Image (cartoon, rainbow, N blue to C red):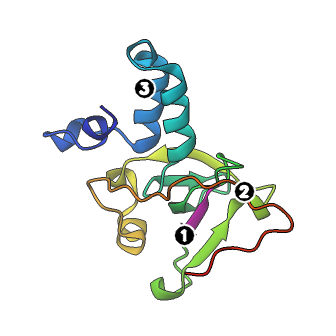
Amino acid sequence: CYDNLCNPARMACALTPHEALSWLFAQAKSQFDAGLLNAFIRMMGVYPAGSVVQLTDDRYAIVMSVNSTRPLKPNVLVHDPATPRDEALYLSLTGTPDLGIRRSLKPSQLPPDARAYLAPRERVAYFFESAHAPLQADEEPAAA
């Protein structure tokens, strides 16, 4: 259902990942197990990776990864015309308490220069890790 909302046959009808999650929660929650739907939303984040957003300081950014402990504060790549694209600012919104996300955008809503810089995809792809139990203070991560 989520994938069909983000990647429909007619791309003009596509919802942003944020809009799709909001729709699932508001309109379709009776169709899904509440625990599974909540787990899915926590895993994907409020602004899933690949979401195009406008920050509260009016800059444009693309979400690179979610922060499962602070879902409104993902890690983003910020559009800055003064910075070369290959040196773009990767910013953790968790570390910037006065900065957040104002709104989610469709890639077509970006100004042309921001769209070229951030290079969002028209179709959404998903990247996530499986959940792991948090490490205890006396545990070491397993060697790869």
Magenta stretch? Answer: 74-78
Residue 142 placement (x, y as % from top left)? 64, 75
Q: Secondary structure at mark 3?
A: helix
- Which of 142 and 25 lies nearest the eye of the viewer? 142
Q: Is residue 78 left or right of residue 121?
A: right
- Above or below, comparing residue 44 to residue 13 in the picture: below
Residue that badge 3 annotates: 23
> Is 27 a magenta residue?
no
Q: Nearer the viewer, residue 92 or 118?
A: 92
Left-right relation of 89 to 105: right
Q: Residues within 10 Å of mark 1 (few under 14, many from 20)?
A: many
Say few, some or many: other residues with alpha carbon within 10 Å of mark 3 (under 14 / 14 to 19 / 20 or more).
some
Q: CA distance from mark 2 to mark 1?
A: 27 Å
What is the quadrant of residue 58 in the picture? bottom right
Q: Which residue is mark 1?
A: 77
Percent position (x, y) of residue 86? 47, 87
Distance CA(mark 1)–CA(mark 3): 26 Å
Secondary structure state at the residue bearing disc 2 = loop
Q: Residue at x 45, y 18 (%)?
A: 29
Circles 2 and 1: CB distance less than 8 Å?
A: no
What residue appears at the point 54 percent right and 25 percent down from the top-left corner?
Answer: 35
The residue that disc 2 covers is 134
Position of 116 compared to 53: left or right?
A: left
Q: Is residue 93 visible?
A: yes
